[in-house]
Image: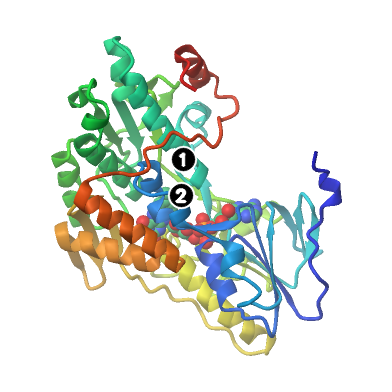
Amino acid sequence: MLDVDKLSLNIPDTTKPRVVIIGGGFGGINVAQRLKCKDFQVVMLDRQNYHGFWPLLYQVATAGLEPDSIAEPLRKMFGSDKFEDFHFRLVKVNGVNPIAKMVHTVVGDLAYDYLIIATGTKTNYFGNDEVKKNSFPLKQVPHALNLRSHLFQCFEQASMTADPELQQSLLNFVIVGGGPTGVETAGALAEMRKHILPTDYPGVDFNRMNIYLVEGMDRVLPPMSPEASEKTLKYLQEMGVVVKLNALVEGYDGYVATIKGGEEIQTQTLVWAAGVQGALIDGLPAEAVERGRILVNRYNQVLGYDDIFAIGDIAFMKTDKWPKGHPGVAQPAIQQGKLLSKNLRRLIKGEKMEEFEYVDKGSLAIIGRNRAVADLPGNIHLGGFFAWMTWLFVHVMALVGFRNKLVVLSNWVYRFFTYENGTRLIIRPFVRKGDTVRQQFINKYNTE
Ligand SMILES: Cc1cc2nc3c(=O)[nH]c(=O)nc-3n(C[C@H](O)[C@H](O)[C@H](O)COP(=O)(O)OP(=O)(O)OC[C@H]3O[C@@H](n4cnc5c(N)ncnc54)[C@H](O)[C@@H]3O)c2cc1C
């Protein structure tokens, strides 16, 4: 049995300013990559040992890609052959003490000269504990593997029951949230229903499989242009997804999803992609936090501190152009990370730092084969094949690591010609604690 008391962060002492980065996501890696360490000691702390490329997470959940191809080990990215005086530790940060200039972890504390909080977001259930307990989130690699396993267990069970009501609930899939994750997951499921499932499960009538996409607002992809929303709705409907707009899921007990107004859908699967909130770290004063994100100035300095920075999804930078903060997508995190590395160098030389100005490079979403939407700078809106090609190109290029680019590209080429989703494996990384309703079901049908 591991004795946690015998572990410590074990970071070498240094005479250089120590920069501690919490989080190896898009923001964290972009600041660290550019802080080549003549001037600083850099310590990165993350609760997972890889950088995750979340835009392709839904493909892991829908058996399109292996999890390894959308993640890159942080130690590989920052190996000592490339980075001097860089130290990674696999640990969750529990809190910070801005007065003592310390971060707290389960294996000990660490002093910092500069602290960068780049912790991103976590799923927001808006206080609905029942939904939290019974639904499937899609934010981390284990979530995607869990959902993938569950989807295929549903199909297996659907092929083993003569009870029409049970079979229907196994073949009803409810996805809550019409943002990119919800839309892309619904589209991928619809493609699977058309091309894969009828041959894998010849005894099941997949005309009975329903995919519901439930969105609280009056259009899908609310952060994108109305043109993109309209095209996406049309594509989803052509693919047989039932889109419910202005609809709020109020409850889900593991069997029945209840929509405000009284409509009920019998389902074994509810995917919760309806919202995120900042992954806050304890210890910052309440006035530094607004709407669950950390208030920062134009240099990403946390309100009230010169030596603490927040970047990416967790940072709330209000500007005239972005009064509600920047969108929760990868580009602000990448751009803030890059600028912060330059600003830290300026700071230690006593030079003036540069203010952050977000360059909006546009937004993309994919719905299915030859069906995607793109809002590009200059008020250009693309749809169909060109947007689809743009989506494929941008995502392969943005992936971290040559191996990942190669594996993803070859997977997509293979799938384009064969219509095969290759990773239809039931491998559960964990069974959720307290999941009694689902566990009873699993026990009853003895399939796990
Ligand atoms: C399913 C999904 C699909 C998405 N699709 C798109 C898309 O198509 N296009 C797009 O631009 N954006 C997309 N996004 C959003 C994009 O991924 C985020 O905007 C981006 O990751 C933000 O970067 P970040 O560095 O702020 O946080 P992240 O990349 O989330 O990184 C945060 C890191 O902090 C670590 N961490 C958190 N808390 C702690 C702690 N207490 N201690 C230690 N480590 C901690 C986490 O493990 C993680 O590695 C998607 C996100 C998700 C979840």
For the N terminus, the quadrant is: top right
Residue 4 is situated, as x and y percent measured from the top left of the image, at 81, 46
Check disc 1 and report the residue beneath it.
145
Between 119 and 158, the one lying in front of the other is 158
Type of amino acid at the residue the image marks with label 2: Pro
Residue found 24% across the figure and 26% down from its top: 209
413 left or right of 320?
A: left
Type of amino acid at the residue the image marks with label 1: Leu
Check disc 2 and report the residue beneath it.
67
Residue found 81% across the figure and 70% down from its top: 12
Residue found 22% across the figure and 53% down from its top: 416
Numbered-mark total: 2
Question: In what element is the residue under mark 2?
Answer: helix
Residue found 22% across the figure and 24% down from its top: 202
Between 165 and 415, the one lying in front of the other is 415
Give yes or no for contact between labels 1 and 2 (Cβ–Cβ under 8 Å).
Answer: yes
Q: How much space separates mark 1 and mark 2, taking CA atoms?
A: 8 Å
